[in-house]
Amino acid sequence: MQTVLITGGAGFIGSHMCDLLLDKGYKVICMDNLITSSALNIKHLDGNKNFRFIEHDVTKHIDIEEDLDFVLHLASPASPVDFDKIPIQISKVGSLGTHNALGLAKHKKAVFLFASTSEVYGDPLVNPQPETYFGNVNPVGVRSCYDESKRFGEAITMAYHRKHKIDTKIVRIFNTYGERMRADDGRAVPTFISQALKNEPITVFGDGRQTRSFCYVSDLIEGIYKLMLSDINEPVNIGNPDEYSILELAEKIIELTGSKSKIIFSELPADDPKVRRPDIAKAKKELDWEPKVGLEEGLRKTIEYFKELEK
């Protein structure tokens, strides 16, 4: 039985990754300091003999006694509301945390996977964004704590690969949604669903014509798993290439919830990307991966989850 350490394992994506790997027969060590995640996301794993939770801040030295086969570094607050609240912690987890996780992988001779982001492309001037695009990022803007720490995380991951010959992977995660997102996450899907279920006005930034591509979480973690087992060391986009405007998303959520909410418009935040769509040709060719869950199906499942939270 192979052992996997997942940093950020109690978070939205990390907890789903714990489930997938346990289902596939791995032993999983979940590490999280619970700064933006929740122990409730992994409560259903209590008593699973192949699962262990360690509460720890990865920006501090990581010490694991067991042998490790994989280190998946998923730890990082990723919500826009956190960029203003905890920018230093976000900067540290992407830099010091990545360094510590890489050091552990080197010591254990483990495969290392870094969860990067489509935010490395910034406010892109190319659409869709292929892995070869270097991005258009404001290095000192309000989003830079996240954008630049992820760009640094990619850089140090590749440095460890080249210098220490570690088998490293980099997944560039595009907008993902699904069960276990925080209701106060600040991102479009949970915000719109929460507002719609309460029949509150749905707040759309700008004119709503900015676009996003929404990947359901089960598709994302399957892509990450395939990358984890691959021999690819360069970054790979994982996301859904179907593109929707934010206004279309708001209208779809109102329709699916049967809400009486009205759409109101607010000022567009600084450096908010106008477009966001992955070029997944590399994932399709090299990983035989592409998303299977359409937006309406995924939204219905996510809405049901948020309805349960309201009870």
Image: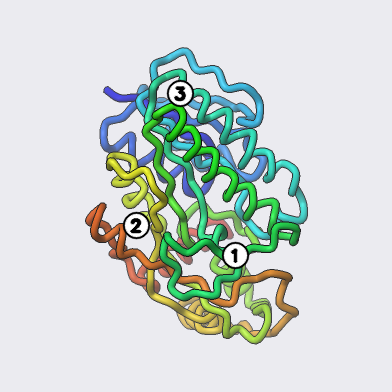
Whether residue 311 is visible: no
Task: Say which element carries label 2.
Answer: helix
Check disc 1: other Cα within 10 Å, few if <14, some if 14-19, many if 20+.
many
What is the spatial separation of the Cα atoms under label 1 and label 3, in whole angstroms? Answer: 30 Å
Q: Where is residue 262 in the image (x, y as percent from the top left)?
A: 64, 86
301 sits left or right of 197 in the view? left
Check disc 3: other Cα within 10 Å, few if <14, some if 14-19, many if 20+.
some
Circle 3 is placed at which residue position?
106
Q: Position of residue 159 (x, y in %)?
A: 50, 36
Given contact means CB atoms under 8 Å apart, are the residues at marks 1 and 2 in contact? no
Q: Where is residue 310 in the image (x, y as percent from the top left)?
A: 58, 60
Given contact means CB atoms under 8 Å apart, are the residues at marks 1 and 3 in contact? no
- Residue furthest toward the top? 65
172 sits left or right of 190 in the view? left
Circle 1 is placed at which residue position?
122
**Number of residue marks:** 3
Circle 2 is placed at which residue position?
219
Whether residue 21 is visible: yes
Give the residue drawn at x 43%, y 77%.
243
Task: Say which element carries label 1.
Answer: loop
